[in-house]
Image (cartoon, rainbow, N blue to C red):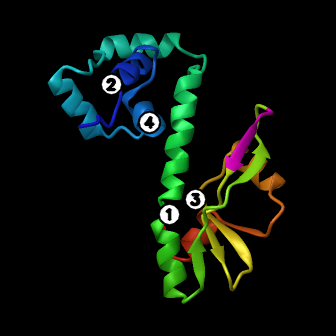
Amino acid sequence: MKKKYDWNFIQSEYNNGMSHSQLRNEYGVSSRAIFLAKARGEFISRNKSDAGNLHNLTKEPIKHTEEFKLKQRDRIIARYEAGWMPKAGAKWLDKKQYNWKRNTKRFQYTNLKGTISHYVPDFWVEELNSYVEVKGYETELDRCKWSQFKDPLVVWKRKELTAMKLL
């Protein structure tokens, strides 16, 4: 049976300063998976004192290996190709009886580091004649993507999602 996580890699990222929360956000590792890996001896957590000391020492961003970046890219592409979608937006579109489809088309853009990345808006909605992005918040990277996006795009941020009663 293929393992879902490479615990040696995750342990090394953790040892280099990532927190449990960062591991969950970056690699999709659940709290339960970490708990079970600790029980099996595949993952060793820091004690609170070490964590506090590490936090004060690590102010520089973690540098990922090229191998990790490629694995992460492939995981994201596979997720989108498998039809991953933001469910709240889909339910709202269905409720309004809009004709929509999950978008899988990837658009190139130049990211904040000046390299080529890909952006996949969430939906294509016929009635809006537009792509729709469901985004409760926005980041500098989001603004970078959106500024280069040439097709019609509607972004539903916190204000819109609250008005639509999705938040």
Spot occupied by residue 97 in the image (x, y as percentages of width and height): 54, 89
| Disc number placed over residue 27 in the picture, else none | 4
As measured in the structure, the alpha-carbon distance from the residue carrying label 2 to the one carrying label 3 is: 32 Å
Q: Looking at this view, is 60 or 145 the one in front?
A: 145
Q: Which residue is mark 3?
A: 136
Residue displayed at 66% across by 51% down: 138
What SS does tag 2 mark? helix
Pointer 2 or 1: first along the chain: 2
Tell me if residue 6 comes above or below residue 126 in the rendering. above
Pointer 2 or 3: first along the chain: 2
Residue displayed at 29% across by 34% down: 3
Circles 2 and 1: CB atoms closer than 8 Å: no
Mark 3 belongs to which amino acid? Gly
What SS does tag 3 mark? loop
Q: Which residue is mark 2?
A: 7
Q: Which residues are magenta?
A: 114-118
Q: Looking at this view, is 12 or 75 the one in front?
A: 75
Q: Residue furthest bottom?
A: 97
Pointer 3 or 4: first along the chain: 4
Circles 1 and 3: CB atoms closer than 8 Å: no
Residue 2 position by quadrant: top left
